[in-house]
């Protein structure tokens, strides 16, 4: 089963993006997600408020851009990605975890014991 389809059986998936390249709508068509495109101004604050509205302590955020840094702090957990385009240093510093692919991050959600192992103190 496709990772998003499998996870969407248990949780709501929201994609909140600045959509820099204007491709999000087409790329997410027919996927079980709710797309939210942020306005060009105050993107970090918009994303933070979005996570807060979802009750941050039960929202997982997975992102890589500098405008994602605030919402990763609020989410539980906030997962930063370092992919081909890189990952913003401030975002990585604000994350609870760092992954190198969205599929790896989604796999953590399917196996909560892996999250516990990585985040225990």
Image (spheres, helix red, strand yellow):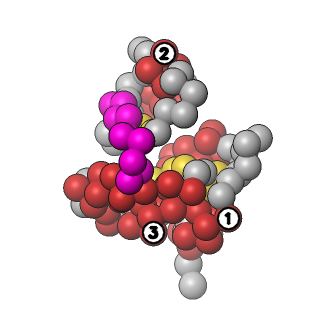
Residue tagged 1: 89
Residues shaded magenta:
34-43
- Label 3 residue SS: helix
Q: Position of residue 82 (x, y in %)?
A: 71, 51
Q: Is 95 on the left or on the right of 14, as rendered?
A: right
Quarter of the picture holding the C terminus: bottom right
Question: Crowdedness of circle 2 by 10 Å Cα count: few (<14), some, many (20+)?
Answer: few
Whether residue 19 is visible: yes
Residue tagged 2: 26
- Label 2 residue SS: helix
Discs 1/3, front: 1
Direction front: furthest residue: 41
Q: Quadrant of residue 2?
A: top right
Real-space CA distance between mark 1 and mark 3, rounded to the nearest whole angstrom: 14 Å
Residue tagged 3: 73
Q: Please report the residue visible at 68 percent of the width from the left and 54 percent of the height from the top.
A: 87
Q: Please report the residue visible at 76 percent of the width from the left and 41 percent of the height from the top.
A: 84
- Answer whether residue 84 is magenta in the image: no
Real-space CA distance between mark 3 and mark 2, rounded to the nearest whole angstrom: 29 Å
């Amino acid at each position: 089963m496709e990772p998003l389809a499998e996870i969407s059986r248990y949780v709501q998936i929201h994609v909140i993006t600045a959509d820099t390249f204007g491709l999000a709508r087409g790329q997410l068509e027919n996927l079980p997600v709710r797309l939210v495109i942020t306005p060009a101004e105050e993107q970090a604050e918009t994303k933070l408020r979005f996570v807060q509205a979802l009750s941050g302590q039960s929202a997982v955020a997975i992102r890589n851009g500098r405008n994602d840094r605030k919402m990763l702090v609020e989410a539980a957990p906030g997962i930063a990605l370092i992919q081909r385009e890189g990952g913003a240093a401030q975002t990585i510093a604000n994350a609870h975890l760092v992954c190198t692919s969205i599929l790896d991050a989604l796999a953590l959600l399917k196996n909560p014991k892996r999250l516990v192992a990585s985040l225990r103190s």
